[in-house]
Image (tube, rainbow, N blue to C red):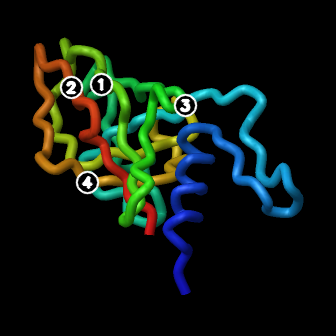
Amino acid sequence: MSKTNAFEDNILDHIFTNTDITLIGDAAGVLGSATAGSLYIALAEGDPGEAGDLVTNELTLAEYGQYARVAVARSTAGWTVSGTAPTQVSNDAAVTFAEMTTGTGVTASYFAICTGSTIATDDALYIGTLTTPLAISNNITPSFAIGVLVIEEA
């Protein structure tokens, strides 16, 4: 059994844009947070898999000395939910990491949408594969244009 497209949209809107899901339980339904907060983009060189293993797969400071997860607001300014099948969510603004000035260098092949800012914490909600792996070395500022980071609800 699968979710309907409308309910997939509702789930993604709730998680990414802090939108209420009405009529679950009562008319008010599942409410958005009083303070929407942010979700965090993490980069990984290995596949975190269904377990969301960022402890062993997320980039490290030894590889990329300035690496830190990037916060994206849980709002329509931060994310767009497609509203069509397949239901997808993508970034509404460029996601830019710090310029690498120290470290051994690394190639990121995956990204994760996480609940916290702490590196190497298994708090991923969604995992995605980068269309093109991103080689990060000195003087590189990793950045993802609008709509590049895409997650699909199935």
Compare residues 55 and 151 and report the one nearer the observer. 151
Q: Give the percent coordinates (x, y) of residue 57.
A: 34, 49
Q: Earlier in the sequence, mark 2 or mark 3?
A: 3
At label 3, the amino acid type is: Ser
Q: On screen, 147 above or below 71?
A: below
Residue 118 visible from this viewpoint: no
> N-terminal of the two: label 2 or label 4?
4
**Numbered tag placed on residue 94 in the rendering:** 1
Q: In this rendering, which labeled residue sits more in front, label 2 or label 3?
A: 3
Q: For numbered disc 3, what is the local secondary structure?
A: loop
What's the residue at 28%, 20% (across, down)? 65
Label 1 neighbour load within 10 Å: few <14, some 14-19, many 20+: some
Sequence-wise, the earlier of marks 3 and 4 is 3
Q: Which residue is mark 4?
A: 129
Q: Are marks 2 and 1 in contact (CB under 8 Å)?
A: no
Identify the secondary structure beneath mark 1: loop
* Residue 114 shows up from this direction: yes
Amino acid type at image mark 1: Ala
Count neighbours of disc 3 (C-alpha within 10 A) and say few if under 14, some if 14 to 19, many if 20 or more.
many
